[in-house]
Amino acid sequence: MKAQRMPRILGVGAMTVAGYDATSSAFVARSGGVDTEELGPVDQEQRPIHGRRVAALSRDLAGIDRLVALAAGALVEAAASFPGQRIPLFLALAEPTRPDAASIDDGAMIERLAAASGVPLDRAMSRVVRVGRAGGAWALEAALAQARAGMYALAGGIDSLIGPATLSFLDGEERLATLDRDGVSPSEASAFILVGPSDAADRTALCDARYLYQAEARAEARALLAASSASGPTWLLADLDGLPERAVELADDLIVTRMTETAVRDELSFLYGEVGAAAFPLLAVHADVACRLGFAPAKRAIVRAGGLTGEGLGIAVLESGADHA
């Protein structure tokens, strides 16, 4: 029987510390990830800061140049099967309060990505969002709206947290992981997703994607989790940002929705390190690869990022169309 025509993930691309494309990244991350290294700067206690960097990129690349270099190949990979002439890109970048992000112009980023990748981006329709680590959910929600209207769109995120200014910022907020403190392991990545209407049964269905605002976030997220729990086993991919408070909040949600009984959990930081605005799309890319290639632990995957009081929460629901899931 022919599959239903619906919004599906038609292509993915990524560049991460685990690999230079989506598939290799997912397989390396699945097998244990990449060890940290000394990034160069020292923290306030004069201890070397450890993290992960993409080995293929020159250490001299910084700012918008580094982000474009991180993203160009991944954008080409994701858009490879796009059948049209122009496509909008909905892109998550670091919030402007980050010292390394304030000087990056949104329009210039879209122009640079189009030039470096050769992907025919629709500049007029493309948008950049800077609302924190759940911004990728806003991007994916916008792409899903295009697919539901019968069109194609790209969603993604790019971030690098290994520059001196960002490391100093994280250190000043006591956010870096140390031997005696929970925190983040700085890393970098780009991830992109091509979404469009399709009846291809072997493609992952994008059932839902939402950026939930502060007042509505917890209630709506719990409703989605509860519905998934009632439907059977679920693979939950979470981004906890190295914060114990997020782990407590998520554990509470899982208990309330009874997902502790049905969920298999993976956390972003153990797979790829801390990748900021790229977190949500990277988890979605990882889930799609796993669903298509047969190593997803459940047919349904939920991606979740953000969620603490005072910020938005991103959530998406994907379902494998493959028989092996």
Image (cartoon, rainbow, N blue to C red):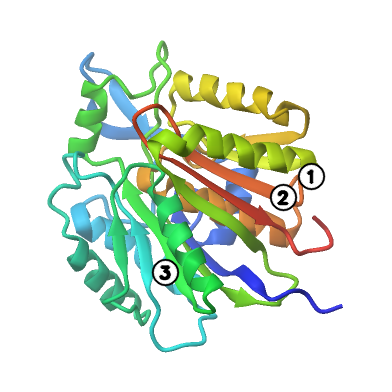
Q: Position of residue 243 (x, y in %)?
A: 43, 23
Task: Give the secondary structure at mark 3.
Answer: helix
Please indicate whether residue 124 sits to the left or right of residue 305 in the image: left
Q: Which residue is mark 1?
A: 231
Task: Give the mark nearest the N terminus, 2 or 3.
Answer: 3
Please tell me whether mark 1 or mark 2 is closer to you in this view: 1
Q: Which residue is mark 2?
A: 300
Residue 53 appearing in the image: no
Tell me the amino acid under the disc marked 1: Ser
Question: Vertically, is 72 above or below 298?
Answer: below
Q: Position of residue 282 (x, y in %)?
A: 49, 51
Question: Vertically, is 100 above or below 123?
Answer: above
- Residue at 40% across / 14% down in the picture? 181
- Residue at 52% across / 39% down in the picture? 268
Please indicate whether residue 251 sits to the left or right of residue 298 in the image: left
Tell me the amino acid under the disc marked 3: Leu
| Contact, mark 1 vs mark 2 (Cβ under 8 Å) | yes
- Residue at 39% across / 34% down in the picture? 37
Separation of residues labelled 1 and 3 (CA atoms): 34 Å
| Quarter containing the N terminus | bottom right
Question: Vertically, is 60 above or below 229?
Answer: below
Disc 3: CA contacts within 10 A as few (<14), some (14-19) or many (>=20):
many
Q: Position of residue 265 (x, y in %)?
A: 66, 34
Task: Give the mark nearest the N terminus, 1 or 3.
Answer: 3
Between 247 and 158, which is closer to the camera in this rendering? 247
Location of residue 302 by image quarter:
top right
Q: Which residue is mark 3?
A: 75
Residue lying farthest to the left in this orientation: 103
Q: Position of residue 39 (x, y in %)?
A: 30, 35
Tell me the amino acid under the disc marked 2: Arg
Separation of residues labelled 2 and 3 (CA atoms): 25 Å
Please indicate whether residue 247 sits to the left or right of residue 233 in the image: left
